Image (tube, rainbow, N blue to C red):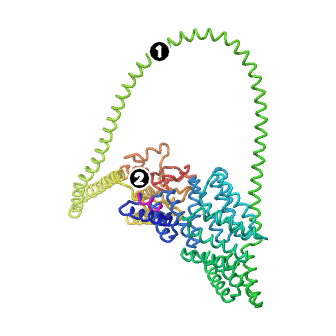
Amino acid sequence: MSGQEQRSTTIDSLKNLLPGKSDSEKFNILFDLSRALILDSRQREALSYATEAARIGWDQGDSLRIIKATMLEASALRRLERLDEALKKSEQVLGIARRNGYAAENKILLNSIALIYTLKADYGKALEYNFETLIAREKDGVKSEISIALNNIGLVYFKMRHYSKAIEFYTKALNLKRESNDTYDLDRLLINLGLCYNQIAGADADDFNQAQKYISEALKTCADNCSPSILIEAHFGLGVSNIHLGELSEARRHFERSLEIARQDNDKRFQCENMVYLGQVAREENDIKGAELYLRRAEALSSELGYGQLLMDTYRQFAVLYTSRNDFQNASFYQSRYIQLKDSVISEELVKNVAKIQTDYEERENISIIAAKEQVIKQQSDLNFAIAIIAMLAGMLVLVLQRSNRTIKRVNAQLSEAKETIQAQNELLESKNKYLDKEVEAKTIDLERANQSLKQVNDELDNFIYKTSHDIRGPLASLKGMCNVALLDVKDPVALDYLRKLDTTAERLNTILTRLLIINQINNSKLSISQVDFESIVNDVLMLEKKKGLPQKLVIRKQIDERAVIRSDRELIRIVLENLIDNAIKFYNEAATVESFVEIYILPMDKGYVKMRVVDNGIGISEENPGKLFRMFFRASERSETGGIGLYIVKTATAKLGGRVGLQTTPEGYTEFYVIFPAYPPNLDEGIEKPSI
C-alpha cells in the first residue's frame, strides 16, 4: 500500500469515529483527522476540522487543547497561502503557551511564526524567531530538534540569497541528523542543500552535480512515500541544475513536471517559481513569445499573492528578455522595478538587523565556549586540590584505623548485648503496633460512619429548608392576601396601622424564605458557563433597584472596564452583584449634610481574574470581626430586613464560582466590599496560573 493510500485509509477511519461522540471525545479525533489531512495536502478540509477542535478547546477552557488545535489551523492557513491569518492565529496562542509554561508547544509555535515571516519575506523577523527557538533547543540538547531549527535558519538565508551561509546551517543540520540517526524531514533537508548548490555564487559544473546528488538522495530517502511538496521541489531543483549545465530540454521536462504537480497540489508559490524558469528556458531557446507568456503569468500570480522575492525574480527575467530583444525602454522599466523591489525586500535596515541577530548569536556561542573552558580549568584545579586533601586524609585514616581496631573489639561485645535488648524491644513494639493498627482501623470505620451521617444530615437539612420554605409560603401568601383585603375594608386607624405592620412583617418573612431557597439552589445547582457581560448585569440590577425605589439624594456611579471579561455562571454572578449593590443602597447615609453615593467598579486583574468593588459612604460596618458579616442570620444593622442572609448568599455564590469576597475600609474611610472572580470556575481552570491576591 502506498503512502497516499495509507493516509486515505487513516482519514476514512477517523471520520467514521466522529458520529455520536461528545465534544470531549471528539477533540482527539478531530485533531488527528486535521493533521492527517494536512499531510495528505487536503488543506481546506484540514482547516475546517482544526477550527472545530479549537472551538471545543475554547468552550472547555482547556488552554493546551486551544494551543494544539490553533497550531493546526495556522498550519493549514499557511499552506493555503493565507499568511496573515496564519500569523495572527500563531501569535495569539504563543502568549498562552508562554504564560502556562508549555515549552514544547512554545518551540513549535516559534518555528511556525518564523516560517510565516520567511514566506512573507520579512527576513529580519524570521531570523529573530528562528534564533530564539535555536537557543531554546540547544538548551534542551535534543539533536533532532536543534537540526530542525538550523534547517529553518538556512531557509531564511536561502531566501535572502546568502547561499554560502544557508549551506553552512543546512550542513550543520544534516550532520546532527546523521549523528542521531534522525530521518524526520531528512528528504526536505537534502532538497534544501540541493537548491542551495544550484544558486551558490560562482557555481561550476561540480556544484550543479553536487546539487543533483543531494536531490537524488532525497528522492531515495522518501522513495514511494514522497509528498507532493518534495516532488515539486525535487523536479524544480533538477530543472535548475540542468539549465545551468546547458541541458535545456531536460531542464524544461523537470520544470513542466514540477509545475504540473504544483497545480495539482494548489502550490501557487512553486507555480510562480517554475513559470519564471520556464520563461528563461524559452528565452534561451529563442521562443520569445513563450518566454513572455510564462513571465506574464508569473508576474500576475506573484502580485496577487504578494510574493516579493518571486516578483523580483520575474522583473529581473523581464529585463533580460527585453534586453535580448533590444527593447531597452521595457528593459529599463523592469530593471527599475527590480531594483526598487529589491531595495524594499532586502533593505539596509534588514541587513543591519540580520547582522545584529547573527552577531548576538555568535557572541553567545563564544561566551558559552569560554565559559566551558573556564569550567574545565576550574574542575582540574579543584581535582588537584581534592587529590592533595585525599592523600592527607588517607594518612590520617591509617592512624585512626590502628587506634579504632582496638576499640572495635570492645564495641562488638557491647553490641552483642545491645542486640539482644533491641530484639526484645522489637518484639514488644511489634505487639503494640498490631494493637494500634486495630485501633486505627476501628477509628477509621467510626469516622466513615460519622462522615456518612453528616452527609445525610446535610442532605436532610437542605431538603428540610426547601420543603419548609415552600410549605410556609402558601399560608404566608394567604395571610398577605387577607391583609390586603382587610386594608381595603377596615376604616379604623388603629386597626389599619396593625394591618400594615402585619403586611410588612409578612413581606419580610417572604423575602427571607425566598433567600433561603436561593441558598438551597446555589448549593445544589450545576454551573452553566458562558461569557459574562458585566455591563449588562449591572444595568439590569440598577434598573431593578430603580423600580423598588431609590433614595432621592443617593448618587450611583459605575466604572466597568471593557477588558474585564471572564467565562462563568451568569446567574450566580448576578446574585453576587445584586446583593452587594442592594446592601450598599439599603444602608446609605441619611444625614442631610452628607452627599450619599454608591460606586461600582469592575476592573481586570493579572492572569485573567476580575475584581469587583462596591464602595459607599453609608452608615458603615465595623471591621473588628469581618468574618461574622458573612454568617447566616448575622445582622450588622437594625435596617437589615432579610435577617442577615444577603451577605451569606454572596459568600456562598462566590465560593461556588471559585472566587473570594471580603470587606475593607478605604483610605477615605468609606466602606468597600470586594469580590475577586477567577477567569474560569474551579472545574475549568486547569493549567491557568492564579494571581497572588
Picture mark count: 2
Place residue 335 in its image quadrant.
bottom right
Q: Is residue 601 visible?
A: no
Name the amino acid, label 2: Ala
The secondary structure that most of the magenta stretch takes on is helix
Q: Is residue 470 visible?
A: yes
Query: Is 240 drawn above or below residue 580 in the view shown?
Result: below
Name the amino acid, label 1: Gln
- Mark 2 = which residue? 653
Residue 572's x, y, as percent? 40, 57
Query: Is 503 drawn above or below residue 339 in the view shown?
Result: above
Residue count near mark 2 (Cα–Cα under 10 Å), binned few <14, some 14–19, many ≥20: many
Magenta range: 25-32
Residue 534 placement, left or right of 128: left
Local secondary structure at mark 2 = helix
Residue 685's x, y, as percent? 48, 53
Residue 341 placement, left or right of 70: right
Q: CA distance from mark 1 to mark 2?
A: 57 Å
Q: Which mark is residue 425?
A: 1
Residue count near mark 1 (Cα–Cα under 10 Å), binned few <14, some 14–19, many ≥20: few
